[in-house]
Image (tube, rainbow, N blue to C red):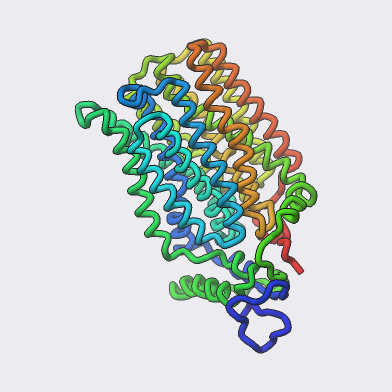
Amino acid sequence: MTSRAEGQAGAVAPERVAAGTVIDTDISARLDRLPFGRFHTLVIVALGITWVLDGLEVTLAGALVGALRKAPMSFTEFDVGLAASSYLIGAVTGAVGFGWLTDRIGRKKLFFITLALYLMATAATGLSWNIWSFCLFRFLTGAGIGGEYTAINSTIQELIPARVRGWTDLVINGSFWIGAALGSFLSIALLRPEWIDPAWGWRIAFFVGGGIGLVILLLRTWIPESPRWLVTHGYAAEADRVVTGIEKRFTDEGITLPPPDASRRLRLKVRSHTPLAEVAQAMFVTSRRQTVVGLALMIAQAFFYNALFFTYALVLERFYGVPGGDVGWYLLPFALGSFLGPLLLGRLFDTVGRRPMIAATYGISAVLLAVVGLVFRADLLGPWGQTMAWMGVFFFASAAASSAYLTVAETFPLEIRALAIAAFYAIGTGIGGVSGPLLFGTLVETGSRDLVLVGYLIGAALMAVAAVVGAIWGTAAEGKSLEDVSKPLAAA
């Protein structure tokens, strides 16, 4: 055994040792010294698919605007913004509630519960009969996705080796745009009146989302609980079994693993939960600098993305006369640029470093957003030209947005990691994400390019502020173990 309870030398640790017992462990060192292999790829696919689902949901909601504005739903532009905000309010609620539970009862239980809620709610959305039922089901769908963010982000952070954590996290968050592309194709196919009755096309789109969720639920059955969470909560023997099983996957492939770094052993005092007072102490006193950085990054990216992407279908229809059934074609370049950004820039977050890359991606996004906004106001480009311009903006903005989740997840202690992700996601989405679609929906409805430009400039200002904050107070976490970046609260 490499994790043992003090005072019980020579004895096998019980399934769960008592709270207050000090455990000496090298679990973290064993996980971080693993090479990146097939196991990690499977974890990324089974858990990272969450962002694909979110991208599918957001894109469907945006691309189906034209169908929802027709009978029998007959949504107004305000209704579209209200539905988008309902989804985001649900995501905030789910993130906070499920985030608290994730730190308390474990990662694995929660990523099953939240995915089950998502697939049931998104399928129910296809059965909506008016704006209020649609908003209710969108709220519940968002709650499932918000819970997924907290459970999945924390699990992936705790299973991926430190040296590739930045790139992996950015690519996983960027996979949102694979779902966006899938949603675009679905909307194109399902909104063709010559292929399918428009009254049923948008309903089938949501049924498909539920079906994908069911497949993913089955894929996750083999994912282990986070060994870091297990050992902190007294399950030392189980944590050792999990890591031994992961190591065996590599040795069975003929890979010789180096011994873990003995200097990185940890002494942890077992706890059943973390009191909320201790959570507040950690976030607003001990780690207040990280809190300021996390809030700045999350609020800026939430406003930027949700305001622009949720309402782009309205912009295309109102200012360029693009038919609702064709909106999906214009969302595909968005998706491509936004996925390529994290994929191609993600390595630099592990080599050049977190702080310079966060400052660069947020700063470039701010400048490009202002420039493209001015081009829109001057009406210099048609719908395809304007879309290509946004593709360039989102190449950098997507990497910036993904780095916000990376920053929050790795700069807070394990015991409050999921709740920290939830809190920052909730505040960022509550301030930037919920207000953004409502504001832009209202601005677009006026038909004034000048007023829409004001919205773009607000987004650019927020991204610029986040760039400065990240450059000054960001954490240089590249290549470091999570425990070195943020010491566990349970450290003895």
Quarter occupied by residue 424? top right
What residue is at 40 percent from the left and 56 percent from the top? 217
List x then y, in percent, for residue 86. 50, 34
Looking at the image, which is closer to me, 235 or 157? 235
**Measured along the vertical axis of the image, is residue 66 above or below residue 240?**
above
Point out the image quarter for the C terminus: bottom right
Q: Which residue lies most toward the right here?
A: 285
When the figure is inspected, residue 160 is found, relative to residue 325, above or below; the finding is below
Quadrant position of residue 453: top right
Q: Nearer the viewer, residue 392 or 436?
A: 436
**120 vs 269, nearest the viewer:** 120
Name the quadrant of the N terminus: bottom right
Which residue is at 76% across, 49% downward?
A: 287
* Residue 273 seen from this side: yes
Establish if 382 lies above or below 197. above
The extreme left residue here reads: 194
Q: Is residue 92 left or right of residue 331?
A: right
Report the side of 491 relative to 185 (left or right): right
Q: Residue at x 60, y 17 (%)?
A: 454
Task: Give the tally of numbered discs.
Answer: 0
How far from the left and from the top, in percent, is residue 459? 61, 26
In percent of width and height, residue 251 lies at 48, 75
